[in-house]
Amino acid sequence: MSQVNYVTKTTFEKMQAELQHMKGVERPAASKAIGEAREKGDLKENAEYDAAKEAQGMLEAKIKQLEGIIATARIVDENTIDTSKVSILTKVTLTNLDTKKQVTYQIVSEKEADLKLKKISAASPIGNGLLGKTIGEIAEIKVPAGVIKFKIESITV
């Protein structure tokens, strides 16, 4: 996980709060559930104990993953973004050359991606294919359905 995760200050703060909640609230609750299940008898035939241990393992995996994301996070200041080319946190207005439909996406980190909000990950095929392109350029992006050609109409913050 040596990949850099570019995030806004708001997203970084949300991730830190989520991590603190997992460590400070969820982890003690998981330990308590294991303790209570252990008191109920033979551990070999104790489904409640097994479920509590499994839940604890999943929580620890989530904590480790989030710690890795935070460790490799770089906060991007929206005031310093170069809008001469597509980069992380820019909003790009595209025209699909096949359908002639226009759409605007914001290029974000994987953690912030939300298609309903028109935020696509820089690691996605479309997001990655747009990075570095300039206004007027045609981006040919390979997607599972084939190749889509987009013309870059504008780049803003």
Image: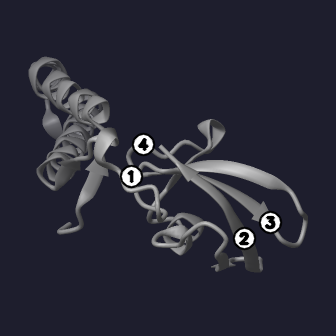
Residue found 10% across the figure and 20% down from its top = 24
Q: CA distance from mark 4 to mark 1?
A: 5 Å
Residue shown at 38%/46% (left/top)?
A: 111
Q: Residue at x 74, y 51 (%)?
A: 103
Instruction: Please report contact status of discs 4 and 3: CB closer than 8 Å, yes or no.
Output: no
Q: Amino acid at mark 2?
A: Phe
User: Is residue 10 shown above or below 82?
Assistant: above
Between 130 and 25, which is closer to the camera in this rendering?
Answer: 130
Q: Gap in Å between the C-alphas at discs 4 and 2?
A: 23 Å
From the image, tell me which residue sits under label 3: 96
Helix, strand, or loop for circle 1?
loop
Q: Does the image show residue 24?
A: yes
Q: Is residue 41 above or below residue 50?
A: above
The residue nearer to you, when weighing 35 against 23, is 23
**Which of the numbered marks, if any, corresponds to residue 109?**
1
Gap in angstroms between the C-alphas marked 1 and 3: 23 Å
- Type of amino acid at the residue the image marks with label 1: Ser
Sequence-first tag of 2 and 1: 1
Label 2 near label 3: C-beta < 8 Å? yes
Q: How many marks?
A: 4
What label does residue 112 carry, if any? 4
Specify few, some or many for label 4: CA neighbours under 10 Å numbering under 14, 14-19, or 20 or more. some
Mark before the other along the chain sequence, 1 or 3 = 3
**Which of the labelled discs sits on residue 150, or is there none?**
2
Left or right: residue 105 versus residue 70 is right
- Tell me the distance, in whole angstroms, between the alpha carbons under discs 4 and 3: 24 Å
As shown in the figure, which amino acid type bears the numbered disc 3? Asn
Instruction: Identify which residue is drawn at 16% across, 56% down.
Output: 72
